[in-house]
Amino acid sequence: MSESAVLRHPPWIRTRLPTGETFATTKAILDGLRLTTVCREALCPNIGECWGHGVATLMVLGEICTRGCRFCAVTTGNPGGFVDPTEPQRVATAVQLLKLKYVVITSVDRDDLPDQGAGHFADCVRAIKRRVSDVRVEVLTPDFSGIESCIDTVLESEPDVFGHNIETVRRLTPKVRDRRAGYDQSLKVLAYARQKRPQKYTKSSIMLGLGEAEDEVIETMKDLRRAGVELLALGQYLQPTKKHLPVVEYVTPEKFMKYGHLARSLGFKGVASAPFVRSSYRADALARPTLQ
């Protein structure tokens, strides 16, 4: 399909509007603490469902990403090295006020920082665990350019799940992701995290509908398993704006079920596979069997 062609949304691509008292409360708390969520910045289709249940994925290190992946709605630019030192405590306050038992912390890429933001990530995890002792914390990190000392910094803060998204199959990576990202680099990050903290769990996510073939998806799942990844999310890519990559295919719910069964047969301990699944969607439920 040409990039100028536009596919109509099939009947299974429907989301409910964000409404309800809990949604309003969540928004008020996050806005009051000046916190950014990937829910809004990435135009996530699940914002109504997640916020309606008082769940949010917090995005730290600002709203400007130093990379420009062609699938992502987050603003690309140069943050100029700025990091807000008050953010870890504000994040911890949000987790406490929202009464979260499981929280996902993610971030933009920060190639402008010497440690690529790893130290700030770790500060956020520690602040949360000091404030709410029984909370589970999942981190969804950038690749840190593959720098092992940056990965070590995050792991030393003891997140319960270390996540990094491979995003797409090997063939499509140069087209979909920023040139500084890489398929093998992502696998190395995940394998290193698993090796350094074998008692913890690693997680990744694949977007479907960008033109990948079934055998490529299966090979990517196998590569992730070889890297030691235990938790996997598969979801439909949705074009955030006309400036981003178009959807090549709307994968059917039945095909997502098939991929889910295949993933479990390959040995993944937790799998979420459906059109609206995102890397942090129902993260608590996906990780629950491995954290008991």
Image: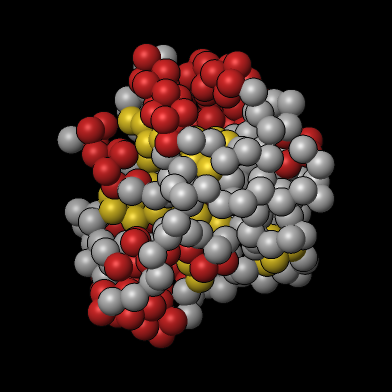
Residue 162 location, x and y as percent?
Answer: 44, 39
Comparing 254 with 56, the one in front is: 254
* Quarter holding residue 286: top left
- Relative horizontal placement of residue 51, taking residue 45 as reference (left or right): left
From this view, report whether residue 229 is shown above or below residue 241.
Answer: above
The N terminus - image quarter: top right
Comparing 260 with 124, the one in front is: 260
Residue 199 location, x and y as percent?
Answer: 33, 28
Comparing 46 with 282, the one in front is: 46
- Relative horizontal placement of residue 84, taking residue 161 as reference (left or right): right
Comparing 136 with 53, the one in front is: 53
Q: How many marks?
A: 0
At x 40%, y 54%, the residue is: 104
Asked if residue 10 can be seen in this view, the reply is yes
* Quarter holding residue 132: bottom left
The C terminus - image quarter: top left
- Relative horizontal placement of residue 171, taking residue 96 as reference (left or right): right
At x 58%, y 45%, the residue is: 237
From this view, report whether residue 116 is shown above or below residue 81.
Answer: above
At x 27%, y 70%, the residue is: 98
At x 39%, y 49%, the residue is: 281
* Quarter holding residue 229: top left
Residue 69 location, x and y as percent?
Answer: 72, 50
From this view, report whether residue 45 is shown above or below residue 163.
Answer: below
Asked if residue 114 can be seen in this view, the reply is no
Residue 190 location, x and y as percent?
Answer: 53, 30
